[in-house]
Image: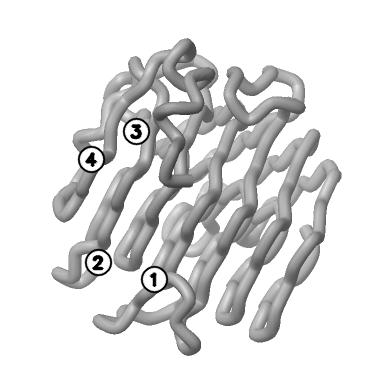
Amino acid sequence: GLVGLNEGYISNSRVVTNLVVRRSNLAGLVGVNEGSIASSYVKDSNLTNESTISSTNKTAGLVVENGTSISSDVEVGGLDTPQILTSFVSGTDSSYIYADEVNKIWSNVEVSGFVYNNFGAISDCYSNVPINSQSVRAGFAFNNAGVIQNSYSTSTFLSQNSQTDYGFVYMNSSSNQAGTIKDCNYLLGNKNNGIFVSNIEGLQALTELDFSNQNYFATF
């Protein structure tokens, strides 16, 4: 949507767009982030990936790859850690209500609402966008081998399928290294028993009413 590869610093940036791809990765803001992204968002946008090759073509609301390699020294604010802070993907004006069904992510292949692969750090972010796919769908991250904290997903799944829908994350590990998820939330009704989901501290499902209660977000 904005940059293919970020190795620097992106802040206070926004994307409002309609994107259609057929043989590539798709993200609303950045393809690969090796630097820092802060206070940026994708909103009121339609992202469509018509590819049928899931092994090479991935879809995410904000960033496809946050970092490209596994590291045991990942931390929020770390100088050498690819990171995303205070950013969001949304189809609505409010961060605590369901996304509308007009501005959405649609994909033939695996898809996530915020980031596809996270090998870096993500903090104080959210996804609130309807997702439609013929494959596995994750509300926030598809695969996490880094750190995600103080973040949430109210993303909804069009044409729900309990076998392929995951409220927050699908896989929380890569090459036997588990990711860390701390103080995060997702919308009640979406399961989160994906593959290799471990090392999770405080991941909980909340109702729509809970999401309007500021007490649940005191650490944000």
Q: Amino acid at mark 3?
A: Tyr
Q: Which one is earlier in the sequence, the residue at label 1 or at label 4?
A: 1
Who's the residue at 71% across and 42% down the image?
47
Q: Secondary structure at mark 1?
A: loop
In the visual, does 34 lie left or right of 144? right
Which label lies toward us, 2 or 1? 1
Which label lies toward us, 1 or 4? 1
Who's the residue at 42% across and 39% down the image?
138
Colour mapping:
one colour
Q: Which one is earlier in the sequence, the residue at label 3 or at label 1?
A: 1
In the visual, does 124 lie left or right of 74? right
- Within 10 angstroms of label 1, few (less than 14), some, or many (20 or more) residues? many
- Within 10 angstroms of label 4, few (less than 14), some, or many (20 or more) residues? many
Q: Which residue is mark 3?
A: 166
Q: Which one is earlier in the sequence, the residue at label 2 or at label 4?
A: 2
Q: Which mark is residue 194?
A: 4
Residue 61 placed where, x, y %? 62, 47
Circles 2 and 1, Cβ within 8 Å, touching? The answer is yes
- 29 w.r.t. 150: above or below: below
Q: Which residue is mark 1?
A: 119
Q: Which residue is mark 2?
A: 174
In the visual, does 63 lie left or right of 196? right
Q: Which one is earlier in the sequence, the residue at label 3 or at label 4?
A: 3
Q: Secondary structure at mark 4?
A: loop
Residue 25 placed where, x, y %? 61, 60
Give me the C-alpha separation between circle 3 and circle 1: 19 Å
Circles 3 and 4, Cβ within 8 Å, touching? The answer is yes
Quadrant holding the N terminus: bottom right
Q: Which one is earlier in the sequence, the residue at label 2 or at label 1?
A: 1
- Quarter assignment of residue 130: top right
Q: Amino acid at mark 1?
A: Phe
